């Protein structure tokens, strides 16, 4: 039995409705959980295909019925826990129902409409049927139908727009706005494609704001994905004015919010430029497109942690294109699992899925990979997991305490049975410990069977770690430790096999006692939850 919510997220005043893939075989009950607790059971009549679960308080929930599972969350806004998807096909042949179903199945509550605009300097097209800047056919009616359908199910439709690009044939029109290299030539994207302008130059800024305003009034889009290309960092305009692009972007974002206070938008910090300046701007999300030298899983985690330090209430969105899907889907799925585990364990998310079941492989979104049905089923389990346990993964008060609790001389939390590391090292179980208001969350990302940790390389099958043990230093007796993972998403309470003692090799551990817990087999990503009353 497959279960899919009728919305990608809910508010506290909405009823949660679950669609069943087949009529209920008999009178039964659907079970709703929050963390380890069953919070509601709802009767299901024989042959029912829709079940109204009622309203819920804010947070993430799991749902179980007749062997099927799903999850849902109740949020104040989709941007509170963003799950970003993409749409790149906007012609009459697109199956809107299939696209929206995929977004609901994966709980994708934001959608980027890639290259929907007519031109970079003129977003609305002159006719209903038109060609985008790279020659793909678009239909404005389909754009609006998709956007409306997305909005109805809780997904915020955002139109792609580059903030500082004009066609090469518009150089003279925008000569006062163009930004120049030291040789006097304008900065370009492609020799004859685009010329870059200063996004904060007053004439261009007024024009661009009016374009965004017209697009909101003339379409059913609800906001924008604002793009840049990551360069230049500094330039000059024709009058000799020096342009610091990081400051220009901040000026632009503030002007958009002032002009369009109800619009939703986010800005692309290409390779982390300039996240330090834009993350605190009045936008709705922190978004980073990842490139070398940020090539490893460790780099992804550090990007997320740094972005959260600027604005903890904005779970970062990492756009890391998995080109490895062009080689082998099985190995690419294994890479995607590790990327998702890295992002979610660091309070971030990953832009990967979209359309009716595709994965991004390239910054030009029409170049994507159609996923096999079994891959989509696996992704649905992963996204269910992140939604169900969002209260632990995305709390803005979360603190990384890894290297003061485990590893090295730390003996508050130790592991045995395999090699464990506080860094993303091939051949180890990568360990991260986060303190949240609810308790300690311990992430165990299994890199034991890997020979490298580049996020865009296909990965080996998981080498399951068996017979590992946790040793937990105790403040008081009766510690509760819960285990859960994607394949076994229900929290299970671990049983202690008795007290242990610290090595007492140094003053930090002297006199500590501990409890030892055998761990279930460790798959790609396992999570331990130790409630706050265990240690405080």
Image: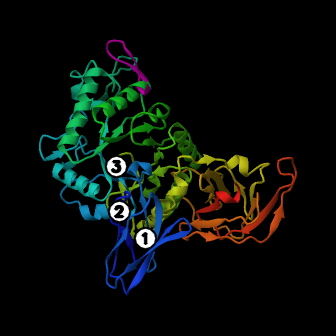
Mark 2 sits on what residue? 104
Q: Quadrant of the N terminus?
A: bottom left
Task: Give the percent coordinates (x, y) of residue 466.
Answer: 69, 70
Residue at 24% from the left image edge and 40% from the top image edge: 133
Q: Can residue 362 be spotted in the picture?
A: yes
Task: Give the percent coordinates (x, y) of residue 221.
Answer: 25, 47
Q: Please say if the residues under marks 1 and 2 sit with CB atoms less than 8 Å apart.
A: no
Distance from label 3 to label 2 (Cα)? 20 Å
Instruction: Give me the disc on residue 365.
Output: 3
Magenta range: 234-246
Left/right placement of residue 250 relative to residue 206 reads right
Q: Which circle, 3 or 2, is nearer the viewer?
A: 2
Left/right placement of residue 504 relative to residue 281 reads right
Q: Earlier in the sequence, mark 3 or mark 2?
A: 2
Element under label 2?
Answer: helix
Distance from label 1 to label 2 (Cα)? 17 Å
Distance from label 3 to label 1 (Cα)? 23 Å
Q: Quadrant of residue 249?
A: top left
Q: Can residue 328 be spotted in the picture?
A: no
The residue carrying pointer 3 sits among few (fewer than 14), some (14 to 19) or many (20 or more) residues within 10 Å by Cα, namely many
Above or below, 274 against 446 in this view is above
Q: Is residue 209 magenta?
A: no
Mark 1 sits on what residue? 374
Outermost residue on the top side: it is: 239
């Amino acid at each position: 039995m497959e279960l899919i919510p009728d919305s990608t997220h809910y508010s506290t005043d909405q009823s949660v409705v679950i669609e069943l893939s087949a009529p209920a075989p008999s009178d039964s009950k659907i079970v709703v959980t929050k963390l380890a607790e069953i919070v509601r059971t709802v009767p299901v009549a024989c042959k029912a295909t829709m079940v109204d679960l009622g309203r819920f308080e804010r947070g993430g929930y799991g749902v179980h019925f007749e062997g099927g599972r799903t999850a849902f969350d109740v949020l104040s806004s989709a941007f509170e826990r963003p799950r970003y998807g993409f749409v790149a096909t906007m012609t009459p042949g697109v199956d809107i129902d299939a696209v929206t179903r995929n977004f609901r199945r994966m709980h994708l509550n934001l959608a980027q409409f890639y290259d929907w605009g007519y031109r970079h300097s003129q977003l609305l097209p002159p006719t209903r049927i038109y060609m985008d800047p790279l020659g793909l056919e678009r239909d404005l009616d389909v754009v609006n139908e998709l956007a409306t359908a997305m909005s109805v199910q809780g997904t915020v439709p955002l139109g792609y727009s580059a903030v500082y690009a004009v066609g090469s044939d518009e150089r003279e029109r925008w000569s006062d706005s163009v930004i120049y290299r030291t040789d006097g030539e304008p900065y370009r994207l492609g020799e004859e494609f685009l010329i870059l302008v200063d996004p904060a130059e007053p004439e261009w800024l007024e024009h661009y704001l009016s374009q965004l305003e017209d697009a909101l009034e003339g379409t059913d889009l609800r906001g924008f994905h604002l793009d840049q290309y990551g360069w230049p960092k500094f330039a000059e305009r024709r009058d000799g004015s020096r342009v610091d692009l990081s400051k220009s972007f901040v000026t632009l974002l503030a002007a958009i919010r002032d002009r369009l206070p109800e619009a939703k938008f986010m800005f692309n910090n290409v390779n982390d430029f300039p996240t330090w300046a834009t993350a605190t701007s009045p936008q709705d999300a922190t978004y980073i497109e990842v490139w070398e030298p940020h090539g490893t899983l460790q780099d992804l985690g550090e990007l997320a942690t740094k972005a959260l330090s600027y604005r903890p209430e904005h779970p970062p969105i990492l756009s890391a294109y998995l080109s490895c899907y062009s080689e082998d889907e099985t190995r690419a799925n294994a890479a995607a699992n590790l990327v998702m585990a890295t992002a979610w364990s660091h309070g971030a998310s990953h832009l990967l899925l979209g359309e009716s079941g595709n994965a991004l492989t390239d910054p030009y979104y029409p170049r994507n990979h159609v996923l096999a049905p079994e891959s989509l089923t696996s992704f649905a389990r992963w996204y269910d997991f992140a939604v169900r346990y969002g209260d632990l993964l995305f709390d803005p008060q979360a603190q990384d305490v890894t290297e003061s609790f485990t590893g090295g001389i730390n003996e508050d939390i130790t592991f045995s049975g395999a090699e464990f590391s506080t860094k993303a090292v091939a051949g180890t179980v990568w360990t991260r410990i986060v303190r949240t208001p609810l308790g300690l969350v311990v992430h165990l990302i299994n890199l034991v069977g890997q020979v490298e940790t580049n996020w865009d390389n296909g990965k080996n099958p998981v080498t399951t770690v068996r017979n590992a043990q946790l040793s937990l230093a105790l403040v008081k007796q009766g510690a509760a430790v819960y285990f859960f993972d994607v394949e076994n998403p229900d929290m299970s309470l671990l049983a202690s096999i008795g007290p242990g003692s610290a090595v007492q090799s140094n003053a930090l551990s002297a006199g500590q006692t501990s409890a030892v817990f055998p761990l279930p087999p460790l798959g790609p990503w396992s999570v331990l939850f130790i409630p706050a009353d265990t240690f405080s």
